[in-house]
Image (cartoon, grey):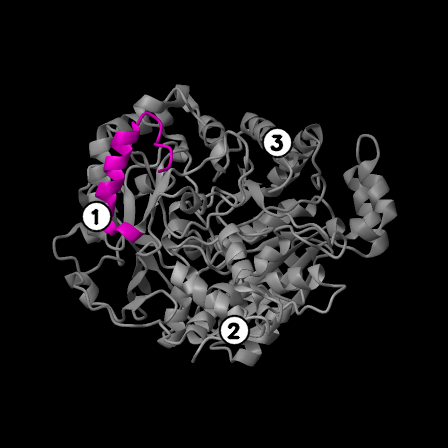
């Protein structure tokens, strides 16, 4: 997150304390990269933890808990065993309910591949990637 | 190949797209229908209708020189551009242009945090930096400054300020445009300009002093279309020693008048952050059939009737949550002063002491805070606000729809204005067939010298009738508001002309002045047609 900028910067910027680039850190293996993309873009809505005061969960987790109230599917994306990569990609690129779609400047096609691989890793029907 | 922008031939558009590819790299020009669709406004109230605002293509530069090249190419081929920062302005247009067929200039890749100087409490960032990004950068550096964050936290620091967005702490910080200091802009002719002290050839104080010398032109780049902002400086809060919250409740309906006067005094002196007005009676409606009967009876209830009901149930008519930031002893003294001041002025006022936090918080303490408070109150960005954006609820578990846009009129910061606005807007909403909490709605206090009587209107991905009803309501209610001197501070794209048109003093002198500027600095009309209700000359007959 807080990498140093190597390109030239103006004299004024040199006077300031710190520089950074705002983007998910770069991982190597697909699962590592997929988790990084998940943590950066998905976790703030779909992770564990409290929501607004009065809401027991974060908004994405809350929505999926209601959606899957009658079936044995986890409201947490990272615990799902039924996700397939193409479904993950479709939801990210099309959006659903109040979740907007994500552009390629936000999640590139390569990062979306990694994210889809990561979220489908627990599905026995998908082939895990080589580490 | 997407359809070209209005008035541009397919051959001309194709040539421009090829030049964009040379400027920014082929992979950063998005011209397939599938890619252009990623720029749709996810909360558009015109979804799937002929008027939905759609991009023809998008171009994503990574540095300012590329932005300049894109602007020059657009001038050469008369291509309308629409810049976005992170594209998260949901409820006010998202990542879509106002003029369909525009090429979106997507600045998300320009995501450098150029500086954070904790000693001078300032930062300089590019448009692709989100509040999350800046917050993480500060945390990782263990820097003793806070940001003032809006809801939700994934938006652009630059973009939010440029749309006059708002936050939650002290007034001078939660007005996000007001807390900016110095900007860099690519002008419509491709030239690069900086404002304030940043305009010095060798600036040493970009984010220290706003005005530099001469006219303050930075205001022209908020909610407008006179250039593409590529860097902005911002003032940050020093991390306070402590935070304290206290709630004041008053028994009678008309006590709101004095209560607002006291809270204004406290805020104007810099003693409190954003106040949060509520009506406990409003929350009681769901469980009190007697109260529901009162507010729905013909002619409505009198103030005395509401006061008698409140007294019979031991409820306050109004309350306000006050936030204090600063040295622990100082803010304890401020809370004591609040109790003395208001207690001596409003009979029956009650005071409830809230939690006190000391900073920095541990993770465990932060979790404790989150159980009772919004994290944005202490400068922590998050996404929790989406809990009230629609979607599935326990009462309506099968709703796969969601989203909203906003009607946000500014009214005077007085208790009388709250009561008057509720009366007028309540009738207007009723006429439009939509619900409004006429007796108990409280204002948002984001912009600290005025109240915002904001309401959300639902949008649907699935049901165009919901969208048509919401648009019609917005148009009708905005007209009623304008008749009473209340203008909106932001607008969804379909409403920009209606909202801007209400600012009509002296035969729209303000709009005519902006159009004169537009013609002078952007004669080809390529930058963000329609933004702020300002159209280039050749499109003035086709207002949104």
Which of the numbered marks, if any, corresponds to residue B442? none
Q: Mark 3 or mark 1: which comes first in sequence?
A: 1
* SS state under label 1: helix
The region drawn magenta spans B1-27
**Image location of residue B502, percent across then percent down:** 48, 27
Give the residue number, with chain letter if any, for mark 1.
B23
Report the mark closest to the observer, 1 or 2.
2
Of residue B303 and residue B488, the one placed in the foreground of this image is B488
* Number of other residues with Cα within 10 Å of mark 3, as a class: few under 14, some 14 to 19, many 20 or more: some
For residue B436, above or below residue B124 = above
Give the residue number, with chain letter if any, for mark 2.
A127
For residue B452, above or below residue A128 = above
Give the residue number, with chain letter if any, for mark 3.
B468
Q: Residue at x 23, y 68 (%)?
A: A5
- Mark 1 and mark 2: span between their CA atoms? 40 Å
Magenta segment, prevailing SS (helix, strand or loop): helix
**Image location of residue A48, percent across then percent down:** 60, 72
Total of numbered circles in the picture?
3
- Mark 2 and mark 3: span between their CA atoms? 47 Å
* Number of other residues with Cα within 10 Å of mark 1, as a class: few under 14, some 14 to 19, many 20 or more: many
Task: Work out which quarter of the rendered image holds the C terminus of chain A and state it.
Answer: bottom left
Q: Chain of mark 2?
A: A
Q: Is residue A108 visible?
A: no
Report the mark closest to the observer, 3 or 1.
1
Q: Residue at x 32, y 29 (%)?
A: B514
- Mark 3 and mark 1: span between their CA atoms? 41 Å
Q: Are marks 1 and 2 in contact (CB under 8 Å)?
A: no
Q: Chain of mark 1?
A: B
**Image location of residue B475, percent across then percent down:** 57, 29
């Amino acid at each position: 997150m807080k990498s140093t900028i190597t390109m030239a910067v103006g004299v004024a910027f040199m006077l300031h304390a710190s520089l950074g680039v705002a983007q998910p850190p770069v991982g190597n293996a697909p699962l590592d990269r997929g988790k990084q993309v998940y943590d950066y873009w998905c976790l703030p809505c779909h992770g564990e933890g409290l929501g607004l005061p009065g809401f027991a969960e974060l908004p994405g987790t809350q929505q999926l808990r209601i959606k899957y109230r009658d079936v044995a599917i986890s409201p947490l994306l990272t615990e799902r065993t039924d996700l397939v990569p193409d479904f993950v990609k479709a939801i990210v690129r099309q959006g659903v309910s109040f979740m907007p779609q994500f552009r390629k400047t936000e999640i590139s096609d390569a990062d979306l591949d990694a994210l889809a691989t990561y979220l489908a890793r627990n599905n026995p029907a998908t082939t895990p990637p080589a580490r | 190949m997407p359809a070209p922008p209005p008035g541009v031939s397919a051959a001309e558009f194709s040539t421009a797209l090829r030049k964009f590819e040379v400027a920014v790299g082929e992979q950063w020009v998005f011209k397939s229908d599938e890619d252009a669709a990623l720029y749709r406004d996810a909360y558009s109230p015109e979804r799937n209708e002929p008027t939905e605002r759609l991009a023809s293509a998008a171009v994503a530069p990574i540095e300012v020189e590329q932005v300049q090249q894109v602007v020059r190419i657009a001038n050469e081929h008369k291509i309308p551009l629409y810049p976005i920062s992170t594209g998260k302005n949901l409820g006010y247009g998202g990542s879509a242009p106002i003029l369909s067929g525009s090429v979106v200039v997507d600045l998300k890749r320009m995501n450098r945090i150029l500086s954070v100087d904790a000693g001078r409490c300032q930062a300089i960032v590019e448009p692709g930096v989100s509040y999350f990004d800046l917050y993480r950068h500060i945390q990782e550096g263990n820097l003793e400054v806070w940001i003032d964050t809006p809801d939700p936290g994934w938006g652009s620091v630059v973009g939010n300020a440029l749309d006059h967005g708002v936050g939650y702490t002290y007034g001078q910080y939660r007005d996000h445009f007001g807390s900016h200091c110095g900007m860099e802009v690519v002008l419509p002719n491709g030239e690069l300009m900086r404002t304030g002290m940043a305009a010095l050839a060798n600036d040493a104080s970009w984010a220290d002093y706003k005005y530099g010398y001469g006219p303050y032109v930075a205001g022209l780049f908020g909610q407008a279309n006179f250039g593409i902002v590529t860097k902005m400086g911002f003032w940050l809060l020093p991390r306070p020693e402590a935070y304290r919250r206290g709630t004041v409740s008053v028994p009678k309906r008309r006590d709101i008048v004095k209560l607002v006067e006291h809270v204004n005094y406290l805020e104007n002196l810099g003693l409190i952050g954003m106040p949060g007005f509520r009506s406990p009676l409003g929350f009681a409606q769901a469980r009190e059939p007697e109260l529901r009967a009162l507010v729905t009876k013909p002619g409505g209830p009198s103030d005395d009737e509401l006061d008698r009901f409140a007294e019979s149930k031991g409820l306050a008519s109004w309350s306000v949550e006050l936030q204090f930031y600063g040295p622990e002893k100082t803010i304890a003294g401020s809370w004591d002063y609040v109790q003395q001041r208001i207690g001596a002025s409003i009979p029956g006022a009650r005071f409830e002491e809230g939690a006190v936090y000391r900073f920095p918080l541990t993770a465990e303490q932060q979790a404790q805070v989150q159980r009772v408070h919004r994290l944005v109150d202490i400068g922590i960005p998050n996404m929790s606000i989406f809990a009230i954006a629609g979607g599935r609820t326990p009462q309506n578990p099968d709703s796969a729809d969601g989203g909203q846009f906003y009607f946000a009129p500014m009214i005077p910061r007085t208790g009388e204005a709250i009561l008057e606005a509720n009366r007028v807007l309540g009738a207007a909403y009723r006429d439009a067939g939509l619900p409004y909490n006429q007796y108990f709605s409280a204002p948002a206090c984001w912009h600290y010298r005025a109240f915002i009587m904001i309401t959300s209107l639902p949008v649907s991905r699935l049901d165009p009738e919901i969208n048509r009803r919401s648009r019609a309501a917005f148009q009708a209610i905005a007209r009623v508001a304008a008749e009473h001197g209340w203008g909106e501070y932001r607008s969804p794209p379909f409403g920009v002309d209606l909202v801007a048109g209400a600012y009509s003093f002296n035969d729209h002198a303000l709009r005519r002045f902006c159009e004169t500027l537009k013609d002078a600095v952007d004669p080809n009309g390529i930058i963000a047609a329609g933004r702020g209700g300002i159209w280039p000359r050749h499109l003035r007959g086709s207002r949104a």
